[in-house]
Image: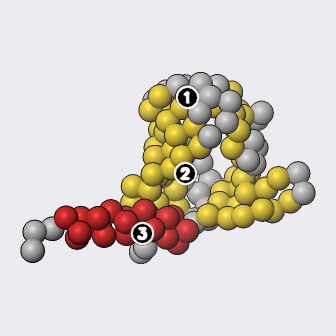
Amino acid sequence: MSAVKVLWVGRETRYLGVLQSLEEGYTAPPHKHLAGAPCLYHLRQACRSATACSMPATMSMSRPAFFHDATTALEDTMYLFICNGALLFFDENGFTRYTNWEVMEKLRSEHEAPVRAEAANRAPR
């Protein structure tokens, strides 16, 4: 299983920051970063992809636009992911979906709406 918490979305810069949590054995699908400068900070444990060596905790990575093969969590893993630009996801049949700052902003807004409504319902009158 995978879970994501959107930390921020920069509408002007197109950067976004998410906290990603992966359970041991979860495999993220192949994807392509359409813009450069993704940064990855492993906060706990490690992942492995077919074309990259194991990525230990506290490792950071920054590189230009690139294709990333499927990545499997070797253990329960948590990382901070910062990027600009869209990501395109693939399976064995081709393109399946994309994500970008607008998709992440929608996720963040949908998550915050129930929290705001709950807070309003508890507010003193």
The reply to whether discs 2 and 1 touch (Cβ–Cβ < 8 Å) is: no
Q: What amino acid is found at the position of numbered circle 3 in the picture? A: Ser
Question: How far apart, in angstroms, are the residues tagged by discs 3 and 2?
Answer: 23 Å
Q: What amino acid is found at the position of numbered circle 2 in the picture? A: Pro
**Mark 3 vs 1, N-terminal side:** 1
For residue 109, the mark is 3
Note whether 49 is above or below 17 in the view shown.
above
Image label count: 3
Question: How far apart, in angstroms, are the residues tagged by discs 3 and 1?
Answer: 27 Å
Q: Position of residue 118 (x, y in %)?
A: 29, 64
Q: Position of residue 95 (x, y in %)?
A: 81, 62
Q: Quadrant of the C terminus?
A: bottom left
Q: Nearer the viewer, mark 3 or mark 2?
A: 3
Residue 89 visible in image: yes
Indicate how the structure is coloured in the image. secondary structure
For label 3, the crowd category at 10 Å Cα-Cα, with few meaning under 14, some 14 to 19 and many 20 or more, is: few
Q: Secondary structure at mark 3?
A: helix
Residue that badge 2 annotates: 38
**Mark 2 vs 1, N-terminal side:** 2
Residue that badge 1 annotates: 76
Residue 34 visible in image: no
